[in-house]
Amino acid sequence: MNSRIRAWHVLVGTALALTSVWAVAQDAPESLLPKGFEEPTPTPTPAAAPAAAGNTAAPRAISTPMVQPIPGTAPAAVDAGAAIPALLGQGGLTRVPTLEELERMSPEDFEDLLGNKIDLDMPPQARRSMEQIGLMDDSEGGLPAASLGSQNASVVEAALAANQGQLVSRWGHILLRRALISRLAPPAGMSPQRFLALRVALLLRMGESDAARAVLQDIDIANYTPELGDQAFETYQRAADFTGLCPVFSSVGSLRDDAQWDAAKAICEAFRGSGASAMAKLDKMRVHGSMERIDLLLAQKYAGAAGRSRKAVTIEWDGVTTMTPWRFGLANAVGLTPPDSAMADADPLYNAMTALAPMVGLERRAAAADHAGSSGVLSNAAMVDLYGQLYSDPEVTGDWQQRAETLRNAYVLEDPSARFSAMQSLWNGANGADAVYARQVLTAAAAARIAPTKDMEDQAPALLTSMLAAGFDSNALAWSPVVASGSQGWALLVLAAPGRIRTVGASPVNTYIDADNSTDKRRSAFLVAGLAALGRIDSSDAGSLSGQLGLGLDSSTRYTAALDRAAANGDSAGVVLLAGLGMQGDDWHRMTPRYLFHIVSALRTVGLEADARMIAAEAVARA
């Protein structure tokens, strides 16, 4: 490293010295007078006639004044030839650049010229530990740091890598996100970088780009591996934060060598002040066809926001029929809305990206919130805040302004029936079952404000579903005297009620089964599975009802065996990761009662009973 630093110093010193010599050569004074007005050239004084040969007088001594030069006023002569060999040697440069080349070089060009990266070491006390990585420990709501200590590394890797990110349960999504951002130590046999890369990748597949970025920023960039570099690139482009990559390029810019990486490096170069050079590089890539035209045009438009290039870039979407995170992130960042032709078959994850993007217009974010709310990306508070912005923005008109006013009415109208009607209007205006559930998340706090009365018994199931969607279980429990035994409202409360409750008998469960009109009586199956997993029904009754409905709760698979084993070992993080693996799917019809039983039971065993209750209640509400 010392030799590279010496080479750097010699290179810079030589460049400055050569520049100084060139400048001195230009320092001769230049007359500002017009021609003809210059001072006349002095007439040479005629030489004195030689003395006569006969003159023998002794010569007189003529004194010459001596002026001592002031130290440092005259520039020292530079022997460039002597400096060059110092640069050219083992571990040095292959050639010395010209002055013109030096002027055009970016920091990355200097690194390439030196042949390696200069390491700027941090003092040991300033470095962050790699032993535990995450945002919160168990005292802040996270999971215990050492909970994966007894887990097999291959099982953890499989649970993280095989999960596609889309879960049937909103509460399962929330719990899995909580585990992934917890300050955890990797299992034995897995490097911290590999463990972090797997976690970040799963967060991105879940649509949690903000959480992924926050976890990624918990380690020093110097500890990045090529795999982490890939995840960092995916994270920042999904978050539409391309300048967030600039510190990565400055520290470990050689992790990758591909067109997108180089284009992003050019963007960072523009934001460091070399706009013309950056635009020239992007132009060259476009001419050579390194990337598709739309991708490079978007990059140029983003880079043009910095510097003084002042180059107009027109984005033409003609012929673009697919969407990528690169295109979507850059389009959002420069204030463009991708066309419908490109979004027609786009992944639903782009809705989560839109809902989280602060630079996107409010109406686009609100439309995307129906997906982000039902999946668990957005909380009730985040959705209410978004609708509050819609209400207060005078430029928002039409349907979205009306919806924002309707939500306000759900909070402030005096008549409880009128408030319920406002909520119902929002639910009925949603498109699809997931969007309806998202609107129930939106109205959860308003539903919790309605006092339980017998007059609203028929509305209780919808109100309870809305409350429990955001975790208002204590408010929901106040409706216990109102709902009838064996009804839908009763089923939600016996699953979601906090604390210890009296064991439920088989009679009200059979009443519920008889009235259940869901496909294949899935609600009843989930109710029995949830009650058995939470220990809220007698084991003999659970076995009888399981046989009646053909649930097979007592059977086992390799997956359920691994889940039960992690629960028996007290491995809360392992249980959550395996639970997330078993809850994959786009609809509750993808979930089996047997898997629900084992998941809820395992969560309860490791102390995550509140999450277990919410998942069980959500299954009955959404089946």
Image (spheres, rainbow, N blue to C red):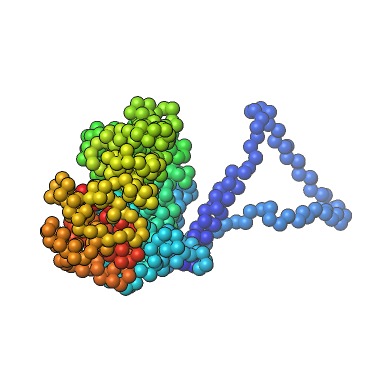
Q: Image quadrant of residue 530?
A: bottom left
Please state the horizontal and vertical placement of residue 421, each as a whole percent of the image: 32, 33
Q: Which residue is drawn at 47% across and 50% down?
A: 102
Q: Image quadrant of residue 216?
A: bottom left
Is residue 312 visible in the rendered image? The answer is no
Please state the horizontal and vertical placement of residue 83, each as a whole percent of the image: 51, 61
Q: How many marks?
A: 0
In the rendered view, tell whether residue 611 sits above or below residue 295.
below
Is residue 307 visible in the rendered image? The answer is yes
Q: Image quadrant of residue 540?
A: bottom left
The reply, left or right, for residue 529 in relation to residue 313 is left
The reply, left or right, for residue 553 in relation to residue 362 is left
In the rendered view, tell whether residue 296 sits above or below residue 1.
above
Please state the horizontal and vertical placement of residue 56, each as a whole percent of the image: 86, 55
The residue furthest right is 57
The foreground one among 490 and 523 is 490
Q: Which residue is drawn at 52% across and 60% down?
A: 9
Q: Which residue is drawn at 42% across and 40% down?
A: 385
The residue furthest top is 398
Q: Residue at x 73, y 37 (%)?
A: 43
The reply, left or right, for residue 544 in relation to residue 9 is left
The foreground one among 345 and 33 is 345
Please state the horizontal and vertical placement of residue 340, each as a whole percent of the image: 25, 34
In the rendered view, tell whether residue 344 sits above or below residue 130.
above
The foreground one among 495 and 615 is 495
